[in-house]
Image: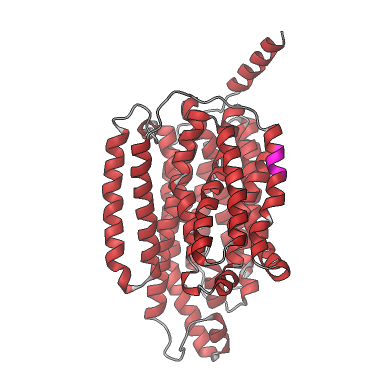
Amino acid sequence: MISLFTVSFLGALDHTVVATSLATIAGDLGAVQQMSWVIVSYTLASTVVLPVLGKLADLTGARLIFLASLVLFLIASLLCGFAQDMTQLALARIAQGVGSAGLHLMPQTIIGEVTSPRQRPRVLSIIGAAFPVAILIGPLAGGLITDAWGWRWVFWINIPVGLVALALAVVAVPHIAGRSGRRFDIAGAISLGVTVTSLVLAAGWASGGASASGSAVIVAALVAILGLAAFIAIELRVDEPLVPLRHFANRTVLITIVLSTVIGVGLFSVVSYVPTYIQMAYRTSATVSGLVPIATVFGMLVSTLLTGWLSSRSGRYRVFPIFGTATAAVGLLVMALLPAGMPLWVPMVAMALVGIGTGSFMNIIVAVAQSAAARTDTGSVTATLSLVRQVGSTTATAVVGGLIGAGVTAGLPAALATLTPQAVREAPDAVQLQVADLYSSVLAPIFVGLAIVYALGVVAAVLLPDGRLSDEFEQHTRDAAEAAIA
């Protein structure tokens, strides 16, 4: 668990640390206009390879993919630090994104392989805590490292930590047998890769708001549709599909996929816009506005640990997604109804409810899906949940960003030449109130829409088959160990 948590934390921390240093990196390399590629290349690579790594884990063993991903991540981190221009950095970030996908996915897969269904919620919640912890400390760590040592150390700091994690993983992570001799679904991997790449690029271009990208968005969307159709046709014919479509025929697995999508769309799509909303609607500084997402993440951290422990103790799981989706829906609805100028603690409490609700079932649904799927599909079903969450987050973020940009631009007060937090703070009080009302009116329907997404999650959670996670695998492992000793 120490090994898996360390590696998960390393992968989660990398994204949040780099985001803080993005402006410094782009300025030093003289490529401010290409700054987004530092994030896009990483995100795109980590998304596309998720199903590939999940299937490879089923075929060759999760331990091998886990160690290979960690080695690739460390090598790519070294190359990122030595990059002399944006092209070199983007290419190194692609490799780093591939490695990061393995660091995120393989610990969950390994837990699914070596623990009983009833143990998994507790263990997955501990491993999953790496994500909210990284969000809490990543931006601060990135700023401190950049200011003290330079932006290159944002990448190089991964190496000493990663080498310790690698040594620990080699010793601690058990061997997990794969299904050697099975053919890998190359055609499915290519078609799904094209589909996901086209979808992510279309979402990214759409969120950019550039008029010249309109035709590119349409072409990318059409490619994504055709790619999806080709992927489904391939998966129906191959013996060893990359994403077994039987997952979608299993009611339990299907509902966990829906709930994973709800998380990506309902929370991750809006959390990055909340600080700007707080700065404008509540007229706070950038530092103070960060308290609201911190409340969200802290609520997520506490609830994921608590519900994981409760679920493992009782074996029950259905109540947690019902409670979580309902709580998050209430929090988002409160955000929609808040008038501008309320005390800051009010949106903090509302967004903390969203975090508490999401954390209540974020890792439990992974344990439930792994328990419902065949053991030979542990890697692929875990990857499928991560994939739909990532794609849902990316596409919904583009939609939310586009709606905010269009709404704010249309209602921008004439007295403001540019809309920045500093410009708003320097404007007269009447103009500040106009901007606050504008942001509240633009964000309110978005919060309502995301609350509806979580409300649909409540329906899905109610339809989740009730049951109790068993200790059968734990007993089987104990019997096998005793037999081996005898």
Q: x and y percent of residue 135 in the render?
A: 62, 57
State the quadrant of the C terminus. top right
Residue 358 in the image: above or below residue 310: below
Which residue in the rendered view is the most extreme toward the top?
Answer: 486
Q: Is residue 123 left or right of residue 274?
A: right
Residue 56 x %, y %: 48, 34
* Residue 323 in the image, given as x and y percentages of width and height: 53, 45
Measured along the vertical axis of the image, is residue 150 above or below residue 297?
A: below
In-image side of 411 versus 292 (left or right) = left
- Residue 373 in picture, x, y percent from top left: 46, 29
For the question of whether residue 271 can be seen, the reply is no
Which residue shows up at 70% across the image and 32% down it? 172
- Whether residue 166 appears in magenta in the rendering, the answer is yes
Which sits in the foreground, 412 or 127?
127
Q: Residue at x 46, y 73 (%)?
A: 33
Is-magenta flag for residue 218? no
Q: Residue 134: tell me if it is visible.
A: yes
Foreground residue among 452 and 217? 217
**Main secondary-structure element of the magenta-colored stretch:** helix
Numbered circles on residues, count: 0
Which of the two residues, 401 or 56, is positioned nearer the viewer here? 56
| Residue bounds of the magenta highlight | 164-168
Query: Which quarter of the figure has residue 207?
Result: bottom left
Q: Residue at x 55, y 43 (%)?
A: 102
Quadrant of the rendering where the N terminus is positioned:
top right
Please report the residue visible at 52 percent of the width from the left and 26 percent of the height from the top.
Answer: 178
Residue 229, quarter of the rendered image: top left
| Left or right of 241 in this view: 49 | right
